[in-house]
Image (tube, rainbow, N blue to C red):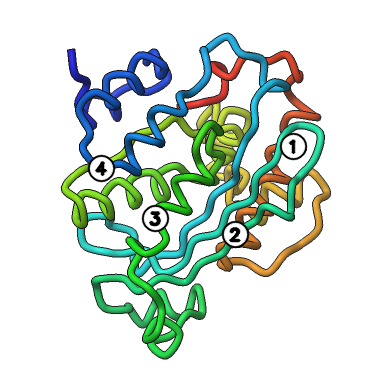
Amino acid sequence: MYLSTEKIKADTQQFDWIQLYQQRLEVVKDDRLKSFYAAGTFAPDTPIKSIPFVAVDFETTGFDPKSDGIVSIGLVPFDLKRIHCKGAKHWIVRPRTALDKESVVVHGITHSDIKSAPDMMRIVEYLLKALEGRIVVVHHRGIERPFLNAALEKRINEGIVFPVVDTMELEARLHRAKPLTLWQRFRGHALPSIRLVDSRERYHLPYYRQHHALTDALATAELFLAQVSHRFSEDTPISELWK
């Protein structure tokens, strides 16, 4: 049975991703997607020490993948032993929607920056090759996976699905597990921030400039390694972390 994107979104942690990749391989038409799915993924019980990861960050024109677009992409491959900076990539791409003034203030990418930038389809083959055979790590899975899926659907009428490890969600497990009591709220207490910069500070990681796709990808990779070192084991199965 073919699993729709909507079904996958319902509870991705429970899916057999190997089977899903095989199913998608049988139905996709685009050769780049065929190559991506043919590379396969990992069994749920695979220890994370055996997995190659890639941290990914997108800067976008807004927060809605249906109406907004990607303006920059950063990625950094890594594993539990080291971050492979030599394999890092950064692209500025031209979105098919107008730049929003508020988003320009956030990421600093202007109309002049994207004027000569390529459409994402010019670099999508390189992007998918960089993701092949790796588990994607992001900080807030509501951006990278849905935006890439929407971008491909708009351009080639075929989307993409893949498991992700979300470092924000891993922080939420620890710091958002219990809501504040009425007394705590009355006394002005607040839940700890799980933003990337604040999460890194808890692990005594250095401050980096925010909202640059490549820097944020590197920051996410470092945060994940710190989370594993402090809270997990290298033998932790990937099924405990991905979504």
User: In which quadrant is the N terminus drawn?
Assistant: top left
Q: Quadrant of residue 111?
A: bottom left
Q: Nearer the viewer, mark 3 or mark 4?
A: 4
> CA separation, marks 2 and 1?
20 Å
- Where residue 89 is drawn, which disc sits there? 2
Identify the residue at horizontal 41%, vertical 16% (top origin).
18
Q: Position of residue 13 (x, y in %)?
A: 42, 19
Residues at marks 4 and 1, CA–CA distance in whole angstroms: 34 Å
Gap in angstroms between the C-alphas marked 1 and 3? 27 Å
Compared to residue 225, the image places residue 190 above or below, namely: below
Q: Are marks 3 and 2 in contact (CB under 8 Å)?
A: no
Q: Quadrant of residue 117?
A: bottom left
- Of the image marks 4 and 2, the number of the one nearer the N terminus: 4
Residue carrying label 1:
225
Query: For numbered disc 3, what is the local secondary structure?
Result: helix
Labels 2, 1: front one:
2
Label 2: element kind: strand
Q: What crowding class fits label 4: few (fewer than 14 Cα within 10 Å), some (14-19), or many (20 or more)?
A: few
Along the horizontal axis of the image, is 53 left or right of 228?
Answer: left
Among all residues in the image, which is located at the extreme top? 45
Q: Amino acid at mark 4?
A: Asp
Give the mark nearer the N terminus: 1 vs 3: 3
Question: In the rendered structure, which amino acid carries the disc numbered 3?
Answer: Val
Answer with left or right where residue 222 lies relative to residue 67. Answer: right
Going by the numbered disc 1, the residue's amino acid type is Leu
Q: Secondary structure at mark 1?
A: helix
Viewer-nearest of discs 4 and 2: 4
Label 3 sits on residue: 124
